[in-house]
Amino acid sequence: GQQVMQIPQYQHVQEGEDFTTYCNSSTTLSNIQWYKQRPGGHPVFLIQLVKSGEVKKQKRLTFQFGEAKKNSSLHITATQTTDVGTYFCAGRNYGQNFVFGPGTRLSVLP
Amino acid sequence: EAGVTQFPSHSVIEKGQTVTLRCDPISGHDNLYWYRRVMGKEIKFLLHFVKESKQDESGMPNNRFLAERTGGTYSTLKVQPAELEDSGVYFCASSRARQHTEAFFGQGTRLTVV
């Protein structure tokens, strides 16, 4: 079945440094979503990407969907302590439900 | 607008007992999903309802798990009898339409089977 992987599993950065997490699917995706889960919280939707090569920005966050629609990335510029949490990608194969990746846990040291 | 609510927030039960989790989706959301996250691993899909119908239950681990959504409003997920490996956080999410809209997650129910 479809598998979604994320790297790295953990990332520790100093406040102000950049951060990137990568999401890779074993199959071509129709669309991909990104979620953030704060410690002790629940996943909160960040964005959805649909088009091949699509790039979307939300303030310091940049999301990219690969040309082959099998991978995606989330880049945070100049991290802040409020960015702490686990970032999940969720990929959807055509006609199927979303499959979540294992997440990347981000720690930001002040 | 009220969000997705789940009850209880925590549950500790003994192996062999029964537990029922409840999810109230956002009003007007026909799509309701159940997910489970075990020991910090990935969020695994369990089940998808469209209104009161089970659209996809391919993620249900075994027949000890029973999900219902009578009337197409709230949903329950019953585990009977519970086993140790059922421990984890059970999330419910709802959305208006499956394909191109975001899913709103509830706070989750942390289930511990001892």
Image (spheres, coloured by chain):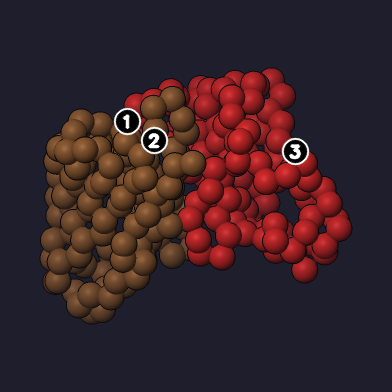
Chain colours: A brown, B red
**Alpha-carbon distance for marks 2 and 1?**
6 Å
Q: Chain of mark 1?
A: A
Is disc 2 placed on a helix, strand or loop? strand
Residue at 66% across, 33% down: B75
Query: Could one spot residue B80 in this view of the protein?
Result: yes
Which residue is the site of mark 3?
Answer: B66
Residue at 17% across, 38% down: A67
Front label number (1 vs 3):
1
**Quadrant housing the C terminus of chain A:** bottom left
Q: In the rendered structure, which amino acid carries the disc numbered 1?
A: Ser
Residue at 82% across, 62% down: B15
**Alpha-carbon distance for marks 1 and 3?**
30 Å
Q: Chain of mark 2?
A: A
Compared across the picture, whether A42 is left or right of B32 comes to left
Disc 2 crowd rating (10 Å Cα; few below 14, some 14-19, many 20+) is many
Q: Chain of mark 3?
A: B
2 and 1 marks in contact (CB < 8 Å): yes
Q: Are marks 1 and 3 on the same chain?
A: no
1 and 3 marks in contact (CB < 8 Å): no
The image's mark for residue A92 is 2
Compared across the picture, whether A54 is left or right of B81 comes to left
2 and 3 marks in contact (CB < 8 Å): no
Horizontal and vertical percent position of residue A32: 32, 39
The image's mark for residue B93 is none
Front label number (2 vs 3):
2
